[in-house]
């Protein structure tokens, strides 16, 4: 990637906090935010075709999450609409990195920031050190690499 080039690929999706996602304090349970990140990645993959879940599955190569960091700033409650911003973060090598920001739609309050890293594995579970071809093609298509 060129030093002066800064490609920002991001997606926004809105999700309503459901009853099954709240805890005894009537707030979104902390683990629900991991599901919101999943919703963000799914929406991102639909917005930027080529690395969505259907694409990854069709390739026969998988991309499990190996690292996740979450910082909570404010609560979400039942029926709140959370706006999830998912950004692709370029790193060289065979990995997918995203960062997330979740805000309550009603007042724009920041509720959570998080990051995830996924690595590629083959059908036998062996870690891939080279990027799968479909991922490199995707990076070129969206101007992440030349």
Image (spheres, rainbow, N blue to C red):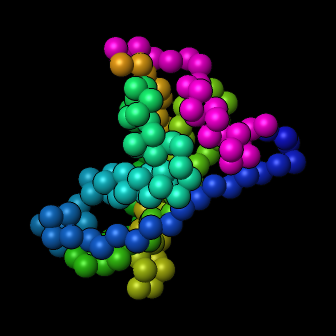
Which quarter shows the N terminus? Answer: top right
Magenta segment's dominant SS is loop
Q: Which residues are magenta?
A: 124-146
Farthest residue to the bottom: give it.
106
Q: Is residue 133 above or below residue 25?
A: above
Which percent across, then down, holds residue 55?
Answer: 45, 40
- Please report the residue visible at 87 percent of the width from the left and 48 percent of the height from the top: 4
Residue 125: say if magenta: yes
Residue 66 in view: no
Question: Which residue is outermost to the right?
Answer: 4
Residue 25 against residue 141 in the figure, above or below: below
Is residue 46 placed above or below 140 in the rendered structure? Answer: below
Location of residue 30 in the rendering, given as x and y in whole percent from the top left corner? 28, 57
User: Would residue 39 be found to the left or right of residue 47 on screen?
Assistant: left
- Direction from residue 142 to residue 87 in the image, left or right: left
The residue sitting at the front extreme is 58
């Amino acid at each position: 990637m060129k030093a002066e080039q800064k490609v920002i690929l991001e997606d926004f999706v809105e999700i309503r906090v459901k009853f099954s996602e709240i805890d005894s304090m009537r707030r979104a349970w902390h683990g629900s935010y991991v599901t919101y990140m999943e919703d963000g990645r799914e929406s991102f993959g639909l917005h930027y075709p080529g690395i969505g879940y259907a694409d990854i599955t069709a390739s026969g190569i998988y991309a499990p999450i190996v690292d996740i960091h979450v910082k909570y700033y404010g609560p979400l409650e039942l029926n709140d609409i959370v706006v999830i911003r998912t950004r692709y973060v370029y790193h060289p090598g065979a990995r997918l990195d995203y960062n997330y920001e979740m805000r309550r739609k009603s007042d724009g309050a920041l509720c959570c920031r998080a990051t995830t890293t996924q690595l590629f594995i083959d059908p036998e579970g062996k870690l891939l050190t080279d990027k799968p071809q479909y991922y490199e093609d995707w990076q070129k298509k969206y101007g992440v690499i030349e």
